[in-house]
Structure formats: C-alpha cells, structure tokens
Image (cartoon, helix red, strand yellow):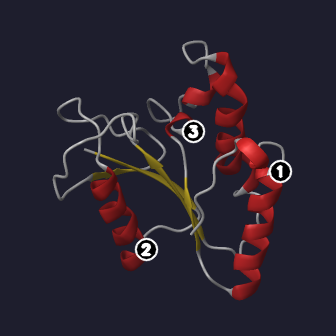
C-alpha cells in the first residue's frame, strides 16, 4: 500500500517515487494499493476527469492535484501487465478538514465519483473499512475505484 502526497520534499519526485514503488511491487509479485485523490475521478461515465478543470481550486494546489491524478491517468496504466494495482479515491468530502461520523458502511464506485446519499463526507474509519475490504476481497485489478457514502 502506498499513501504519499505530492507536496513538501516529494513535490518534485512524487511520480518517480511511485514508479519505483510500482517496480518493487511488481518484482515482489504483490499487489499495489494506492490512496488516490478525488480530482482524478469523473463526474459521469466517459466524461473528462475533474482534474481537467481546476478553475474552482486555489492555484497553489494545482500542481499537487495534477501530480496525484497523473498516477492513474498515465503512470499506473503504463506499468507492466504483471503488476496488479488498485487506485482508491475517496469521496469529495473527506479528510481532516471535513470530519465525518463513522457509519460502518460505504458505497463503492469505479472511476465515476460516488455521489453522497446525504451530501455528507465519508469518515476516515469508513474509508479505511472500504480500503481493507478491497484488499481482502481481491475483486478489483488494475482499476480505479472510489469510496463514499
């Protein structure tokens, strides 16, 4: 599993670090689960990813968002077919600045954003529950998924 952010000391090396992690996982024959970002998702099947229009996002976050999305748009699909990977994006409302109540459940989507049933955020505990389920169930391969309420 990998959960790195393209900021601070990793800002310039983020994608190279993930390429190295992918090579190591492939050589070891283990699946790679990556904590992804919401902006790499699509609003509807076949639509452009959210990252294609960042006009509503502060400019100082654009490079970080683009680097994270590049993992699923370019880097992971380009890995050897022997590498099994899953890119797991959270719902839009997720994180330390958007705490949410633990519900003990989640909704699973693919590369199309799961819209929250109640407009609420997914808690870190419910995101973790979904993430562990993905690992244990082993139903997704070389795919992007997202977890929401």
Find the distance from the CA under tag 1 to the CA under tag 3: 19 Å
Tell me: 36 left or right of 75: left
**Which image quarter holds the N terminus?**
bottom right
Of callouts 1 and 2, the N-terminal one: 1
Can you say whether 130 is above or below 96 in the image? below
Query: Foreground mark, 1 or 2?
Result: 1
The residue labelled by disc 3 is: 40
**Which image quarter holds the C terminus?**
top left
The residue labelled by disc 2 is: 135
Can you say whether 97 is above or below 29 in the image? above
Task: Say which residue appears at 53% left-offset and 68% top-offset.
Answer: 141
* Disc 3 residue crowd, few under 14, some 14–19, many 20+, Cα 10 Å: many
* Disc 2 residue crowd, few under 14, some 14–19, many 20+, Cα 10 Å: some
Can you say whether 71 is above or below 139 in the image? above
Indicate the position of residue 56 as horizontal and vertical percent values: 54, 13
Of callouts 3 and 2, the N-terminal one: 3
Q: Quadrant of residue 44?
A: top left
């Amino acid at each position: 599993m990998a959960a790195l952010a393209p900021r601070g000391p990793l800002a310039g090396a983020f994608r190279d670090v993930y390429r190295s992690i992918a090579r190591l996982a492939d050589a070891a024959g283990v699946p790679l689960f990556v904590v992804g970002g919401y902006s790499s998702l699509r609003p509807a099947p076949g639509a452009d990813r959210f990252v294609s229009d960042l006009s509503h996002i502060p400019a100082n976050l654009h490079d970080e968002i683009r680097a994270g999305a590049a993992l699923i748009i370019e880097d992971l699909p380009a890995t050897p077919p022997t590498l099994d990977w899953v890119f797991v994006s959270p719902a839009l409302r997720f994180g330390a600045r958007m705490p949410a109540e633990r519900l003990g459940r989640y909704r699973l989507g693919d590369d199309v954003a799961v819209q929250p049933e109640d407009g609420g955020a997914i808690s870190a505990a419910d995101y973790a529950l979904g993430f562990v389920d993905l690992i244990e169930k082993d139903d997704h391969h070389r795919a992007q998924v997202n977890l929401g309420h």
